[in-house]
């Protein structure tokens, strides 16, 4: 861990590079942005994988869930395009709320398929 | 707080109007968002695991309710996890804006307790069907 000496060195470097004092780790925000957009991609792929799995149990339901995947992808692209600004919190609240709604919808659909759907026993055998 | 007010506090419009405090460091906002996304993927995985158990597994001999007993709680847990993850995201963002200590997360507890419960039920179902 960096002690006081390490912190002092870090500050010295930042000043040496001429970074603005109020924003010493601007490049790190870019990495956080990158990580977040990758997380969005993983989430979209997850929806696709779930849709593919449900396809095996019920074709129509699987297609509906598969159709959600590109929507999640687009929501993620919205996060990539907009830089971190004052209005960011507001935008992400709506997007994350939509994801929650989508998962609830998928859960309800899966529940209906699980209860009423014709099962294909032994498909995993 | 009543349930209706708690639910109303989760709507995006209410979250957007919550302009108290100051905009936190963008990295914290991103990290909070990633945490929510990771929990929502976990929720999705639980939902599809529950569906696979009910629809794709061969029936357990001697335990006709075995598959729904294991699968339906997993699907329900997936839904609960998604809603809880969103409410925790709202609470964390609220705390970040005000520089308050981060709220304690109940999600690991919910997940661990339910997975343990499902494991016990699965062991019992397997033992019963093995003795048939």
Image (tube, helix red, strand yellow):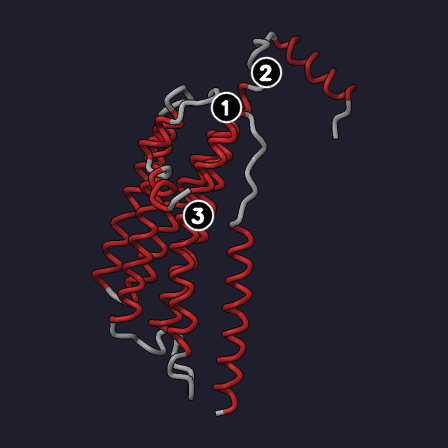
Q: Quadrant of residue A125?
A: bottom left
Q: Is residue B68 above or below residue B42?
A: below
Q: Nearer the viewer, residue A99 or B7?
A: B7
Q: Is residue B129 above or below residue A35?
A: below
Left or right of A32 in this view: B77: left
Q: Which residue is mark 1?
A: B24
Which residue is depicted at the point 52% across and 79% down?
B124
* Residue position for label 2: A24
Chain assignment, label 2: A
Q: Write the residue at 30% across / 37% down.
A: A74
- Residue nearest the viewer, comparing B46 with B106: B106
Marks 1, 3 in one chain:
yes
Q: Is residue A30 visible?
A: no
Residue B26 picture location, percent across and down: 49, 25
Q: CA distance from mark 1 to mark 2?
A: 15 Å
Q: How many marks?
A: 3
Q: As rendered, which of B61 and A33 lies closer to the eye? A: B61
In the rendered image, which quarter contains the N terminus of chain B? top left
Q: Considering the numbered disc 1 on the image, is that residue within a helix, a strand or a loop?
A: loop
- In which chain is the residue bearing label 1? B
Marks 1 and 2 in Cβ contact (< 8 Å): no
Q: Are marks 1 and 2 on the same chain?
A: no
Front in this rendered view, residue A32 or A117: A117
Give the mark toward the camera: 1 or 3. 3
Question: Which residue position holds label 3?
Answer: B84
Which subunit holds the residue at mark 3? B
Q: Secondary structure at mark 3?
A: helix
Neighbour class for label 1 at 10 Å: few (<14), some, many (≥20)? some
Please state which of the two labelled residues, at mark 1 or mark 2, is closer to the viewer.
Answer: 1
The residue sitting at the left extreme is A60
């Amino acid at each position: 861990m960096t002690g006081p000496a390490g912190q002092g060195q870090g500050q010295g470097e930042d000043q040496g590079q001429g970074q603005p004092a109020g924003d010493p780790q601007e490049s790190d925000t870019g990495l956080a942005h990158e990580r977040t957009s990758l997380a969005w991609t993983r989430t979209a792929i997850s929806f696709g994988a779930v849709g593919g799995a449900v396809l095996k149990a019920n074709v129509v339901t699987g297609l509906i869930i598969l159709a959600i995947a590109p929507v999640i992808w687009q929501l993620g692209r919205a996060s990539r395009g907009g830089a971190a600004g004052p209005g960011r919190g507001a935008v992400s609240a709506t997007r994350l709320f939509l994801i929650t709604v989508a998962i609830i919808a998928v859960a309800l659909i899966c529940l209906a398929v699980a209860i009423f759907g014709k099962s294909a026993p032994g498909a995993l055998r | 707080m009543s349930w209706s007010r708690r639910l109303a506090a989760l709507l995006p419009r209410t979250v957007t109007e919550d302009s108290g405090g100051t905009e936190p460091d963008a990295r914290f906002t991103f990290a909070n968002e990633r945490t929510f996304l990771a929990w929502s993927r976990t929720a999705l995985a639980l939902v599809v695991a529950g569906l696979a158990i009910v629809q794709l597994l061969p029936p357990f001999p001697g335990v006709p309710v075995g598959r729904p007993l294991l699968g339906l709680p997993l699907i329900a847990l997936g839904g609960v996890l998604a809603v809880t993850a969103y409410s925790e995201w709202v609470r964390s963002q609220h705390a970040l804006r005000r520089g308050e200590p981060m709220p304690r997360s109940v999600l690991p507890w919910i997940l661990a307790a339910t997975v343990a419960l499902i494991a016990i039920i699965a062991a019992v179902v397997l033992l019963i069907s093995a003795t048939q």
